[in-house]
Image: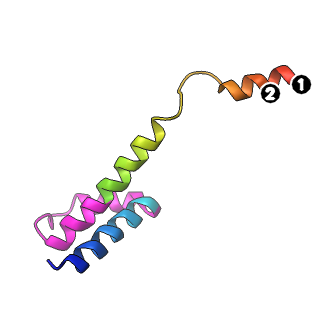
Amino acid sequence: MEEKHYIKAFNNGYLLAKHEPALAAQLANTPNQHDPYFEALMSGKAEYEKEVREWSKGFSRGGPAKDERQIDKER
């Protein structure tokens, strides 16, 4: 596959995962997995999901954030 087409397919997969995650998940379960366009599309989807996981690691899962507790004390 030409690099220009791979990049376009990768970007399409990234955007699809970002804006239509249910559709991206359905596509991931189709039998086209050996098609070069499809592989690039799924690579873009995987990259978006990886970035979201990395981004979400920065948030605590415990009680309210420190800033919220400070705001309550000031009231």
Is 32 positioned to the left or the right of 42 in the image?
A: left
Residue 36, relative to residue 26: is it above or below?
below
The residue positioned farthest toward the left in the image shown: 34
Tag 1: residue type? Arg
- Across and down, in percent, residue 55 comes to 46, 43
Crowd around label 2: few <14 · some 14–19 · many ≥20 (10 Å): few
Magenta includes 21? yes
68 is higher (above) or lower (below) than 32: above
- Position of residue 34 measured from the top left corner of the image (x, y, whole percent): 10, 66
Quadrant assignment for the N terminus: bottom left
Compare residues 27 and 44 and report the one nearer the observer. 44
Residue 44 horizontal/vertical position (percent)? 30, 62
Give the distance between the C-alpha atoms of the residues marked 2 and 1, in whole angstroms. 7 Å
* Residue 62 in the figure: left or right of residue 19: right
Residue 28, given in percent of the width and then of the height, sits at: 25, 59
Comparing 21 with 70, the one in front is 70
51 is within the stretch colored magenta = no
Q: Residue at x 40, y 42 (%)?
A: 53
Which label number is shown at residue 75? 1
Residue occupied by mark 2? 71
Magenta portion: prevailing SS class:
helix
Q: Are marks 2 and 1 in contact (CB under 8 Å)?
A: yes
Q: Nearer the viewer, residue 61 or 6?
A: 6
Side of 41 where 72 appears, left or right: right
Span shown in magenta: 19-44
The kind of residue on which mark 2 rests is Ile
